[in-house]
Amino acid sequence: MIDSIEHIGIAVKNLEEAITVYRDVLGFKLEGIHILNERMVKVAFFSVGESRIELLEPLGSDSAVAKFLEARGEGIQHLAVKVKNLEAVLEELKGKGVTLVDESPRAGAEGTKIAFVHPKSTRGVLLELVEKPQK
């Protein structure tokens, strides 16, 4: 069902300041910056070996990332894993009684399809399922 860890999502208050830390201080390679208006978030992706780090800055106080920052402060917000057939994985998880945030896939950054699993089904971890576009 799950192929590998895709990325770790980290909520930040100021994306430009966080980029400076991850790129200039830690030496991670910045892959790109994306604005996801429908999720009210601006993200930056970094390569870290075979995995990635995603920094997320909210674009408004109503975004899920803004609510996370308000409740918990900056830090790890979610764990993302790669899947091959997101629709089938969602159906399988529903069949197992897993609580989903998203009942069907939605558009993610970089042409991906994504869906979230509610933290109450994963011992407090927000899990993002990511299906990469076929090349």
Image: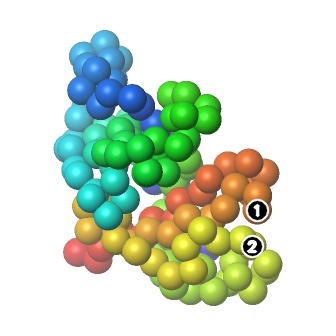
Q: Looking at the rendering, which quadrant does residue 15 occupy?
A: top left
Residue at image coords 67%, 49%: 125
Quarter of the picture holding the C terminus: bottom left
What's the residue type where badge 2 is placed? Val
Q: Are marks 2 and 1 in contact (CB under 8 Å)?
A: yes
Name of the residue lying farthest toward the top: 25
Q: Looking at the rendering, which quadrant does residue 23 occupy?
A: top left
Residue at image coords 60%, 68%: 101
User: Crowding near pointer 1: few (<14 within 10 Å), some, many (20+)?
Assistant: some
Residue indicated by mark 2: 98
Provide the secondary structure element on which disc 2 rests: loop
Of 73 and 110, which appears nearest the observer? 73
Sequence-first disc among 2 and 1: 2
Q: How is the image coloured?
A: rainbow
What's the residue type where badge 1 is placed? Ser
Q: Disc number at residue 28?
A: none
Whether residue 106 can be seen here: yes
Residue 47 image point, x, y percent: 32, 39
Residue 126 image point, x, y percent: 62, 53
Residue indicated by mark 1: 121
Q: Is residue 32 left or right of residue 62?
A: left
| Alpha carbon separation for disc pair 2 and 1 | 6 Å
Quarter of the picture holding the N terminus: bottom right
